[in-house]
Image: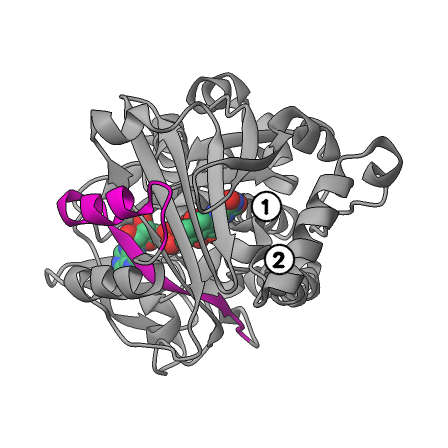
Amino acid sequence: MDVSIVGGGIAGLTLAYWLSERGDRVTVLEKSSSLRAEGFMIDFFGPGYDVAEMMGIHDELKTIHYPVDALVFMKNSGEEKYRIPYQKMRSLMNNKHYNFMRGDLEQVLYEKIRDRVDVKFNASPISIDQDENNVTVTLSDGSTVTSDLLVGADGMRSAVRSLAFNEDRNHSIRYIGYYTAAYIIDDPEILKKTGGSFYTYSEPGRQVSVYPIRGDKVATFFLYTNPEQQGHVNKEEALRQLTEKFGHMDWIVPDLLRAGNDANDFYFDEVSQVELSEWKNGRITFVGDSCQCVSLLAGQGASMAMAGAYTLAKSLEEHPADLTHALSEYEHSLHSDIETLQRSARKFANYFLPDSWWRLYVRDVLTRASILPGVRKFVNFKTVRLPK
Ligand SMILES: Cc1cc2nc3c(=O)[nH]c(=O)nc-3n(C[C@H](O)[C@H](O)[C@H](O)COP(=O)(O)OP(=O)(O)OC[C@H]3O[C@@H](n4cnc5c(N)ncnc54)[C@H](O)[C@@H]3O)c2cc1C
C-alpha cells in the first residue's frame, strides 16, 4: 500500500516506522526544513513506552534520557520547600519512564526510518482530493503526491483536518484555559544558580520551572491560567505577557525572563485539546495530536501519539482488504479511551496548577503523600490499551 503521512513529529515518524516495517511505501511530508530542535522536556511513560520496546529503541532512549534526580518545589525566596526523588515517581510507573527532550525523541525515530521512508521537508498540503481509488495531496510548491491512504499527523492545528473536513482548523480545538512557554537558555551564570534537578515554583494560577539540559544549558517551562484564548501571539508579545504574569517573582525568575529575549527556540502556545467527532473521511485518517491531543496536562501526549500510530498500523495489517473497516477499527479501539484521558486531564488541571494558596497547600500535601509506601498503590495513571 502507498501511504502519505503529513507531519514528521512523534506520531508521523512512529507510523512511518510501523508501516514501512510491514512493507508499505511511505512518504512523510513535513512543513519544516529539518527536524525540530530540542523543544521541551517530556515525561515518557505508558503505552508509548511499550511501543518503543517493540521498536527496539530503548538503548537510544537511555542515551537521550536525562537522569533528573528530583522534582524540587521552591519558595519564592529561592529556598527549597520540599523535594520528591524522581526514582520514587518512576516507581509509580513501574520504572517504565524516561525524561527526554521532544526533539531528541524525534531524532531517534527519524534515524529508524530515514533509509526506508521518503521524508520530504518544506512540504505542506494546500488541497486534498480523493475518489474511490486513491487520494491526492497538492503541496504548497504545486507538486502532488498520490497514495492509497493519507494520514494527518500534523499536530493540534492540523491542516489535513481542515482540508479533509472543509472546516476552520480551530473548529475541533477545545481551549482549556492555560498558556505555556518553553525556551532554552545558554547562559553559564544562570546555569550556576541551578543544580541537577527539575525546580519549580508555583503561585495561584502560575508556575515556573527550570531544569538543566545537555550542553551546559537550562530549559524553562512556564504555565499560567488565562481565561481568554488568543490568536497568534508573536515572541515580543509573549514575553510581555510572561513578564506581566511572572515579573513580580524572586528566585531566579527575573534572570529567566530576561534571557527569553535571546532564546532562539522560543515556544509559546495555548493549552488545548482536540476533540474530533470522527477520525476518518474516506481515505484520510489521523494520528497523534491532530485527532487526539490530550494536552500537556495529561503528561502523555507523546506516548499516546506513539500508541495511536502503532494501533493504526496494526489495524491496517489486520484488515488488509478493507480500508474503511481498518480505519473504523482503529478509531473504535482508541477514541473513547482518549476522551476519558482528556476528561481526566481537565480535572487534573486544578491540582497541577491550583488557583488559590489554600489549594496549593493541599496539592503540596498530596504530592508529598503520593510517594509514601502505603499511598503509592492508590496512585493510578489513566491510559489506553494497545492492541495485542
Ligand atoms: C510544553 C509541553 C510539554 C509537554 N509535555 C509532555 C510530557 O511530559 N509527556 C508527553 O507525553 N507529552 C507531552 N507533551 C505533548 C507532546 O509533545 C505532544 O502530544 C506530541 O508532541 C504530539 O506529537 P504529534 O506528532 O502528534 O504532533 P506534533 O508534535 O505537533 O508534530 C506535528 C508535526 O507536523 C508538522 N506539521 C504541522 N503542520 C504541518 C503542515 N501543514 N504540513 C506538514 N507538516 C506539518 C510539524 O512541523 C511537526 O513536525 C507536551 C507538550 C507541550 C507543548
Residue 171 x %, y %:
42, 81
Q: Tell me which label, 1 or 2, sits earlier in the chain.
A: 1
Name the residue rendered at 34%, 31% in the picture.
107
Does residue 142 show up?
yes
Neighbours of disc 1 within 10 Å: few (<14), some (14-19), many (20+): many
Q: In this view, does 259 lie to the left or right of 202?
A: left
Magenta residues span 249-276
Instruction: Determine contact: label 1, label 2, CB under 8 Å.
Output: no
SS type, badge 2 = helix
Q: Which residue is drawn at 49% across and 69% down?
A: 274
The amino acid pointed to by label 1 is Ala
Numbered tag placed on residue 360 in the rendering = 2
Residue located farthest toward the right when viewing the structure as drawn: 374
Total numbered circles = 2
Q: Which corner quadrant holds the C terminus?
A: top right
Secondary structure under tag 1 reads helix
In the depicted structure, whether residue 23 falls above or below residue 223? above
46 up-or-down from 331: above or below: above
Residue wearing tag 1: 307
Q: Residue at x 50, y 25 (%)?
A: 68
Q: Residue 261: horizontal and vertical position, in percent?
A: 15, 49
